[in-house]
Image: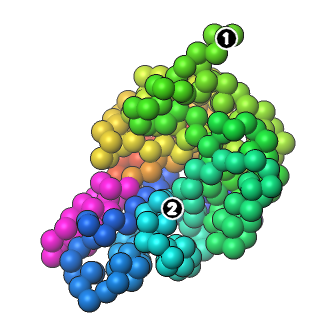
């Protein structure tokens, strides 16, 4: 199955384009999942529980590599075990933000697409499009390229102007649009919901882009403002909620709190299925 079809089916099944972010921080995991366990086992138990509690109301999961790598030697093993817990019909996104020269990029590609079996990956484009090329050309996989991120540091580079007057983020969007022409629906962009007032010019450069949208929830992005900006966008938007769902509760009622938060965000973002297109 190609990536676009899998994504379309996942959205239709969940009734929302919501994606849940897995950022497993041992300091925030409920005590009931940590007692008597190693960090690796506690993280695995926590992620497995989150998947069980959220899978009906989301299209898939964004696994943040930093939180798995921080565990140490066992971290990538836990990452694989968590990937294996995710239902096959769900989208599995490796939030790895990789970006390197061709031969190294090829190994990252093989690691995440072949060894770990992820459907898509986040990439950093600042070394140029040749660092993206090894990940492209497969209809069953997709990439999400950092274009205009939700953090304040986006001002330092992504919102700087080039000599021709374009912003760096606009140039990235144009290059992503060009790369996507070879196999439409496999090259997307990461754009932050905290940047809604600056998104229009980026979306104009790539109006059919798949969009991965962090920044709502713990980072404070406004869903209503996001809906307004996306009303004419033709690509599927995928909002990601991490901390505001997985750490919605920390006491004995944490499971019901996670479920409630997931349902609330799923309902909010169900509106996106009505304003974006395949």
Q: Residue at x 80, y 55 (%)?
A: 103
Name the residue: 33% across, 65% down: 25
Q: Magenta stretch?
A: 242-262
In which quadrant is the N terminus drawn? bottom right
Density class for disc 1 (Cα within 10 Å; few <14, some 14-19, many ≥20) is few
Q: Looking at the image, which residue sits at the far bottom?
A: 36
Q: Which mark is residue 163?
A: 1
Q: Determine which of the numbered discs, if any, sits on residue 65 in the image.
A: 2
Report the front residue among 269 and 133. Answer: 133
Magenta span main SS? helix
Asked where in the image residue 118 lies, by quadrant, the reply is bottom right
Looking at the rendering, which quadrant does residue 163 occupy? Answer: top right
Examine the rendered structure and indicate whether residue 131 appears above or below residue 85.
above
161 vs 12, nearest the viewer = 161
> Which mark sits nearer the N-terminus, 2 or 1?
2
Q: Is residue 166 left or right of residue 66?
A: right
Q: Secondary structure at mark 1?
A: loop
């Amino acid at each position: 199955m190609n990536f676009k079809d899998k994504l379309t089916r996942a959205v239709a099944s969940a009734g929302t384009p919501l994606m849940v972010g897995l950022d497993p921080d041992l300091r925030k995991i409920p005590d009931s999942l940590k007692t008597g366990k190693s960090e690796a086992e506690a993280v695995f138990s926590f992620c497995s529980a989150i998947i069980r509690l959220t899978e009906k109301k989301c299209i898939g999961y964004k696994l943040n590599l930093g939180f798995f790598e921080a565990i140490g030697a066992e971290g990538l093993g836990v990452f694989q075990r968590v990937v294996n817990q995710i239902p096959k019909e769900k989208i599995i996104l490796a939030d790895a933000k990789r970006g390197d020269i061709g031969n190294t990029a090829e190994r990252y590609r093989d690691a995440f697409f072949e060894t770990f079996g992820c459907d898509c990956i986040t990439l950093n484009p600042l070394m140029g499009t040749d660092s993206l090329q090894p990940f492209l050309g497969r209809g069953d996989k997709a990439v999400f390229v950092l274009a205009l991120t939700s953090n304040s540091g986006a001002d330092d580079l992504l919102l700087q102007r080039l000599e021709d007057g374009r912003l760096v983020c606009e140039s990235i969007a144009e290059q992503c649009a060009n790369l996507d022409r070879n196999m439409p629906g496999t090259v997307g962009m990461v754009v932050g919901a905290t940047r809604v007032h600056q998104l229009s010019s980026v979306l104009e450069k790539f109006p059919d882009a798949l969009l991965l949208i962090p920044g709502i929830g713990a980072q404070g992005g406004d869903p209503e403002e996001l809906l307004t900006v996306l009303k004419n966008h033709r690509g599927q938007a995928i909002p990601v909620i991490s901390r505001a769902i997985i750490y919605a509760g920390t006491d004995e009622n944490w499971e019901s709190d996670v479920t409630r938060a997931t349902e609330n965000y799923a309902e909010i973002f169900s509106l996106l299925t009505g304003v974006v297109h395949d």
